[in-house]
Amino acid sequence: MQAAGKYRKERIDRGIKARSDTIYVLSTYSDMLYLFLPRFLPLAALLSIPLFLGGGYWGKVLFYSCVFALLALSWDLMASVGLVSLGQALFFGVGSYVAGGLNHYLNWPIFLTVPAATLGGALLCTILVVPVLRLRGVYFSMVTLILPLLFSHLIETLEILGGTHGLLSLSPFPSHWLATYLAALSVGVVLFGFRRLMNEDFGMVLRGIKDDDRVVMAGAINVHWYKAQAVFLAGMVGSFAGALMTHYYQFVGRSAFALDYTILPLAAAVLGGPGSFAGATLGAFILVPLSEALRALGGLRIALYGVILIGALVLLPEGVFHYLERKYHQFEREVEI
Amino acid sequence: MAGEVILRVEHLTKHFGGVTAVARVSFQVQRGEFVGLIGPNGSGKTTLINLITGFVRPSSGRISFKAKDITGKAPYSIAQLGIARTFQMARALHKLPAYKNLIVPLYSRRVKQFTGGRYGERDDIAIDLLDDLGFERDSSVPYKAAGSLPHGYLKRLDLARCMALRPELLILDELFSGMSMSEVAATLPIIEKLHREGLTIIMAEHRLKELFRVANRVIVLNFGQKIADGSPLEAMGQEEVQKAYLGTEVED
């Protein structure tokens, strides 16, 4: 059966890593570039693309992509602690309404509402989520799914915060550029910040909680306190995204608690590959423009979007980012067998 | 301070549904003692350990550590006070490299103040601790994902995790089960050394020969009840203990 000229692919890891995850031996410029470029190029692209797109339709799409990337990053941080959230819309909605409310009722300017919404929204969300942190797995997910619905219905039936009409004519960003660059820069900061955080000692504790929380407890670590901190960080990012969107639209309504803000970030993280943050970001920058590009198809859009999503998950179950990462770190060559 | 009672267990009882896993068990452990905890399978050794370390809440009874009531406290706050325990099934953080497993206790409030002054200091402490337990620092073993290590290494990793906490009371739940003869032979002197340095140890174990080499007192459990408490010779001489052991271990 062994015919001559049969080949198989052989994969070899690039020999750059030495000893451990934290110690590198770098000797040449090419080694340094090898590590530097995959971090620098996406960031450079993120910051230069707005210049080409301007303030038109695709400029808006870029802004949305950044907002959804922030939500996906927020989802991924919670998932890294073992909290599978179905409620990124909660963070988004609370942030939106805090920013909108402060602007509408108290006339706070935009440079105060956004930070206030980021911190206040995160605090509010953490207080809401802390009582259910003890729940495990799907039970936690269920509660996070219900919370945004609860808010949406409270606003509708109690006619508070503008009721079904929402809060209109809020302060806009001084310019499109400011909004876009604020969003794009934040994506960069959060992406690299979270990646760094998860490799610090603090991050090891968070990862440990996902792995086996009883071992972490036995290590004299208050698991709930660390989970609450992770929720607060995720809440900050999600609420910030909501506040940005509110001022971008100059409007906040019940739609801020819509399921879109839960499902799309989750789909982005899963498509890109969860656990790396880069995957979640990449996923958002694939999914949001894709769903806009398919808009021309009318009713078929959602169907085709679904097919693409399923196809990607079946073909690349590890996620796009992990696939690219693996390819980047390995040589491939054909060997005769 | 010799003679100080470090752990006091009073009338401790735990029911699981209709089953009484631990029934009115009382004993005291003095600082510096090495207490063996033995008994046939299902006699309540692990439940007793889970009760002391807070992983299971007692149905009734009282536990105090250094004269402080710890009954019903959360596992982390009991560990915070200085009681470290290993797990029978060698739990580990499987996705993290072995040495990163130790970052978790090293990052706890109990130990944090002594470690981590300099970037990567906790990593160095972790590798030192593992090196002492046979994870050679110059080999690849300490840097491998814990999930890829053989069982014997996981057991020792569990012990290293306890040592990272700088405990005052160490509770070992069948540390030697699943270890090879050579691993036991290598680990036993380490435990003896810890005891000589003043650490109080409670050790649940089935390997009696090894246990009796180090323990100066044994507590025997059967069906959740304490049936003997004393020096190994005394305890094993009691008729009830022999019955409990012979009744389950020899079944020809």
Image (spheres, rainbow, N blue to C red):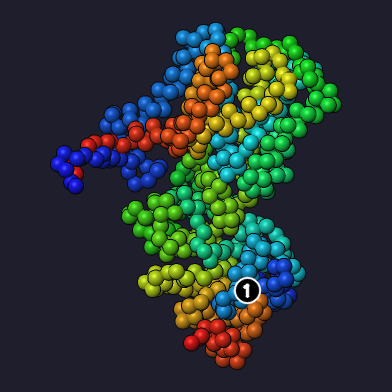
Looking at the image, can residue A65 be seen?
no
- Identify which residue, B37 or A269, lies in the foreground: A269
Residue drawn at x 64%, y 19% is A245
Q: Which residue is mark 1?
A: B44
Q: Quadrant of the C terminus of chain A?
A: top left
Going by the image, does A289 lie left or right of A330? Answer: right
Residue drawn at x 47%, y 71% is B176
Q: Quadrant of residue A253?
A: top right
- Identify which residue, A83 or A149, lies in the foreground: A149
Q: Position of residue A98 (x, y in %)?
A: 73, 24
Pointer 1 chain = B
Q: Position of residue A89 (x, y in %)?
A: 66, 29
Going by the image, does B141 lie left or right of B194? Answer: left
In this rendering, is residue A256 above or below A219?
above
Label 1: element kind: loop
Looking at the image, can residue A45 be seen?
yes
Single out the residue that lies furthest toward the front: A1
Q: Quadrant of residue B202?
A: bottom right
Single out the residue that lies furthest toward the right: A158
In this rendering, is residue B31 above or below A167?
below
Q: Residues within 10 Å of mark 1 (few under 14, many from 20)?
A: many
Number of dots carrying numbers: 1
Residue drawn at x 66%, y 66% is B51
In this rendering, is residue B158 above or below B60?
above
In this rendering, is residue B72 above or below B234?
above
Single out the residue that lies furthest toward the left: A4
- Identify which residue, A80 or A27, lies in the foreground: A80
Going by the image, does B196 lie left or right of A83? Answer: left
Amino acid type of the residue that numbered disc 1 sits on in the rendered structure: Gly
Q: Position of residue A5 (x, y in %)?
A: 16, 39
Q: Position of residue A250 (x, y in %)?
A: 69, 13
Residue drawn at x 64%, y 61% is B55
